[in-house]
Image (tube, helix red, strand yellow):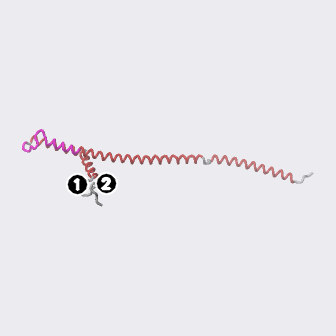
């Protein structure tokens, strides 16, 4: 499938020129540099280098390569700062992206937890309502007492009815 001249609907094929890099690998590299630049070990090492630099360039006349205004030392510091600042910012941006992703995951977990909690609260409420409708021992005792009294009344009534029937069916003795 070839592209017609002037056809801008498809990108041009062919070789690509330029620097290609893995942004993730570069990001990890910048984070490692930023972590190193933020350590006490780095600050101590840099302080030692600066003290030795100044000592050699002030006191050792034969070894002087950067006399008093220390322009070369300032150039190194400027170069270091011009690279360190963007690397630190890149590391901070990557950390901010990770923090945003973590916050989003936390929100999702919180939403699920809230939904689960509301579901469990509804379930507990339904169980409480069901338990409230259960018959208690006191209810059973009271009902059994009432039924026993009714049975006694019926038994007495039946006994009286039978007694009356017997008296009615027996021949009268005169």
Element type where label 2 sits in the image: loop
Left or right position of 138 against 45: right
- x, y (%) of residue 167? 85, 51
Task: Depth check: give the residue in front, 101 or 15.
Answer: 15
Left or right position of 125 against 16: right
- Pointer 1 local density, CA inside 10 Å: few below 14, some 14–19, many at least 20: few
Task: Depth check: give the residue in front, 117 or 1.
Answer: 1
Q: Earlier in the sequence, mark 2 or mark 1?
A: 2
> CB of mark 2 within 8 Å of CB of mark 1?
no
- x, y (%) of residue 10? 30, 55
Left or right position of 75 against 114: left
Left or right position of 19 against 138: left
- Give the residue pinned by disc 1: 17
Which residue occupies the extreme bottom position in the image? 1
- Give the residue pinned by disc 2: 9
- x, y (%) of residue 137? 62, 48
- x, y (%) of residue 110? 43, 46
What is the span of residues highlighted in magenta in the rendered image?
A: 61-84
Number of the front mark, 2 or 1 = 2
Which residue occupies the extreme top position in the image? 69
| Residue under the point 75% across and 48% down | 153
Element type where label 1 sits in the image: loop
| Residue under the point 22% across and 54% down | 17
Task: Depth check: give the residue in front, 9 or 93.
Answer: 9
Whether the magenta-drawn stretch holds residue 82 is answered as: yes
| Residue under the point 60% across and 48% down | 134
């Amino acid at each position: 499938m070839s592209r017609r001249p002037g056809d801008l609907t498809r990108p041009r094929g062919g070789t690509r020129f330029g620097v290609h890099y893995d942004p993730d690998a570069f990001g990890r590299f910048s984070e490692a540099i930023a972590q190193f630049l933020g350590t006490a070990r780095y600050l101590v090492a840099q302080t030692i280098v600066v003290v030795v630099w100044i000592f050699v360039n002030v006191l050792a006349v034969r070894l002087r390569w950067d006399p008093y205004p220390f322009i070369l030392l300032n150039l190194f510091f400027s170069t270091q700062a011009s690279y360190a600042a963007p690397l630190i910012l890149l590391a901070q941006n990557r950390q901010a992206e990770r923090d945003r992703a973590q916050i989003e995951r936390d929100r999702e977990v919180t939403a699920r937890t809230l939904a689960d909690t509301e579901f469990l609260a509804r379930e507990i409420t339904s169980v409480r309502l069901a338990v409230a409708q259960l018959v208690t021992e006191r209810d059973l005792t009271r009902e059994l007492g009432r039924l026993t009294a009714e049975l006694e009344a019926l038994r007495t009534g039946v006994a009286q009815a039978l007694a009356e029937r017997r008296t009615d069916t027996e021949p009268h003795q005169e």
